[in-house]
Structure formats: structure tokens, C-alpha cells
Image (cartoon, rainbow, N blue to C red):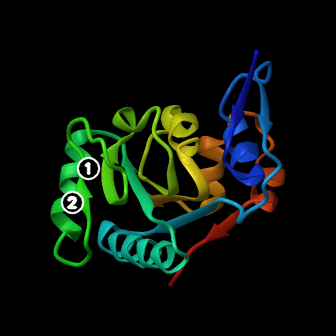
Amino acid sequence: MSKSFRSTNEIIEFSSKFIDESVKIESFSRSGTPPEIVYKDNSGDLDEKLIEIIEDYREEGYQSIAVLCQSLKEAKELYGRIRDNIDIQIIDDTHEDIIGTFIIPVYMAKGLKFDGVIVYNVDKSLFYIASTRALHRLTLMHQGLSPLHYMACICPWGNCITFSIMYQLVKME
């Protein structure tokens, strides 16, 4: 079985770590920025960094940006915390137009593609779906664990040393 994606090579390579090795993924050989993993010690700091990343994505010219959350409940909670600080919409039912910046549960994003995707505190079982929504930029954000500990938790194939070297691990103070 083979699947083809329009995402960058770096996003495809990252995403492929979360599916069965027998699935062959083909890309359009488009290079880009490696996925980033950002962590903070608390939700307030994580929310502030999220706003910075959204602003960076906008400055890079991305017209469709998704912040993917674990559930609709978590999406609504995040929206409530940041909506006064940044222009953002929540998608809680079907949505035709994906131009803009949205907070959306992962399960509602399946089948959609966005220029930039920020995966916000999502369980590793949803990483493949979440990461393959990104065309150009992908950032995984989480709270509490150091990047190497986080990688050990999400790394399904066991070789997290290689993984941590391949992708940008970031903690912004």
C-alpha cells in the first residue's frame, strides 16, 4: 500500500514514524523546515508561545493555520484562554472555508490540509493524523515533559536519539 502527500519531505518523514512500516509514503520531493517540538512547564507559558508561533506562521505568509487539540472540550478551553489575544476561530462543526487561523479537534481535521499546523497537547495515538494535516510547517507543543522525555513517550520505534537529532527540539524561555 502506498500513500502520496503534498507535505514537505520533513513532515512526511516525521509523520511516517507513527504508522506501520509496511505503508510506503511518496512525496513530491519538496523540502521545508523540520517539525519543531516545543514544551513549557505550564499552560500559561504554553499559550503565550502558541500565540508567538501563530504570529510567526502568519509572518511567513501562511493563510491557513490549524491548532489541533485532543478533543472539542480542550479546543473550546484553549479558545477561551487565547481568543482575546489573537484573531482566531474555533471549528466545532463542519466548516467549508479553511482560510484563517482555527482551533479544531484532531478528529474534525481529518481530510483537511493547512499551510501550518500546531499540534497542542495531543495524545501520541493521534500524531499521524495530526501531523499529516500540515503542508509546510508543523509544530508539536506540550506541557510538562522535557523534549527528550517527551520523545521517549512518543517515539514508537525506540530510537529516540536519532529522532531527537533529526528534528528541532525547542524550549523557549
Question: What residue is drawn where x is 45% and y is 65%?
Answer: 63
Helix, strand or loop under label 2: helix
Seen at 65% across and 59% down, the residue is: 35
Q: Mark 1 points at which residue?
A: 75
> Who's the residue at 51% across and 31% down the image?
125
Q: How many marks?
A: 2
Farthest residue to the top: give it: 1
Query: Could you say whether the residue bearing mark 1 is in a helix, strand or loop?
Result: helix
In the image, residue 41 lies at what x, y percent?
A: 42, 69
Residue 17 visible from this viewpoint: no
Write down the quadrant of residue 127 in the picture. Answer: top right
* Residue 66 % position (x, y): 41, 55
Neighbour tally class for label 2: few under 14, some 14-19, many 20 plus, Cα within 10 Å: some
Which residue position holds label 2? 79
Left or right of residue 126, residue 20 in this image? right
Please name the amino acid that badge 2 sits on: Tyr
Answer few, some or many: residues within 10 Å of disc 1's Cα (few below 14, many 20 plus, some between 14 and 19): many
